[in-house]
Image (cartoon, grey):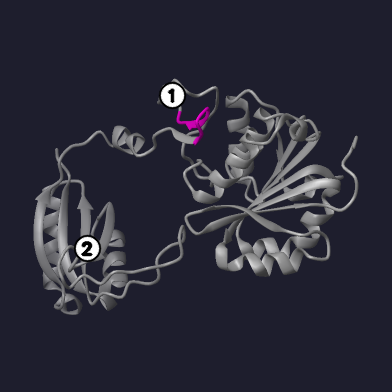
Amino acid sequence: MAMHELVLRAPLARVEALSDLLLDALGALSVASEDAEAGSGDEQPLYGEPGLPPPPAAWAQTTLRALFADAAGAAAAAALLAARDDTRDVQQVAIAAVPDEDWVQLTQAQFAPVEITPDFWIVPSWHAPPAAARTLIRLDPGQAFGTGTHPTTRLCLRWLATQPAARRARWQRVLDYGCGSGILAIAAALHGARAVDAVDIDPTAVAATRANAAANGVAVQAGAPEAVHGRYALVLANILARPLELLAPLLAARVEAGGELLLAGILERQADALRAVYAPWCTLAVIDRDDGWVLMHAHRAGPAPGG
């Protein structure tokens, strides 16, 4: 039995209450909304920072697509809406069958292998490794941030993959602070880090990091931030600018003398503020850019271990 969608048109101010009504009382499986004028000359484009959600919708009329298990459910919901006094400004556009699809296959098709460098790739488990991949991370999309598709993650991964052997040899201890999926911790381990700690305030991220590290055959100690101890040759933090500002004393204190700090999740316009906040401990510099985001790096004062 094919699923059906009830297509409605409503004023923007009614969208939230109408969506709640469809989901909570009328049996909708999901509700999606879009500008009712999308694709026409009256469409209202919305703009936001790269990588962040767009600002609140500014269009006047909204198209809602409520998905139901069958045609009877969609028709019943339409009839109930038509009978209510508080939905007289809601227009029924159509009830239509939704073609059967292999939703797993469609979802997987959205996630192709990601090239970090010509020989380093992030590859979902359902894809064969590209012929050029000499080093790869097997990683599937999940609840924790970090699949290699976001510019901030790519910046960090590219840096890790392109450092000379002499520099990697100094990575006796590496810390990935705010590890998400664990992708940076795994990449560090694959590129020469001897011991890698990964921490996150989200237990889901900690669990994801442990599972992903095991799937890639690398040793990563994942836990809560309280588990961190001592200092590290390399500290990675791909979060956002404001948390990075608040964490400056903590992150700087974890870098050993002569060690390195690598920060991401920073928009170009935020770089100067980060540089000022970290100035008491180190001199941050922008070393790479990608789609409006920057990668910042610093050496902690003091001689490098063994040098």
Magenta range is 116-124
Disc number for residue 64:
2
On the question of residue 47 being in view, the answer is yes
Quarter of the image with the N terminus in it? top left
**Image spot of residue 80 (x, y percent):** 15, 66
Q: Amino acid at mark 2?
A: Leu
Residue nearer the viewer, 298 or 35: 298
Disc number for residue 130:
1
10 Å neighbourhood of mark 1: few (<14), some, or many (≥20)?
Answer: some
**Is the stretch drawn in magenta largely helix, strand or loop?**
strand
**Image spot of residue 7 (x, y percent):** 15, 60
Q: Amino acid at mark 1?
A: Pro
Residue nearer the viewer, 112 or 218: 112
**Tag 2 secondary structure:** strand
Asked if 48 appears above or below 212 in the picture, the reply is: below
**Tag 1 secondary structure:** loop
Q: Residue at x 66, y 26 (%)?
A: 218
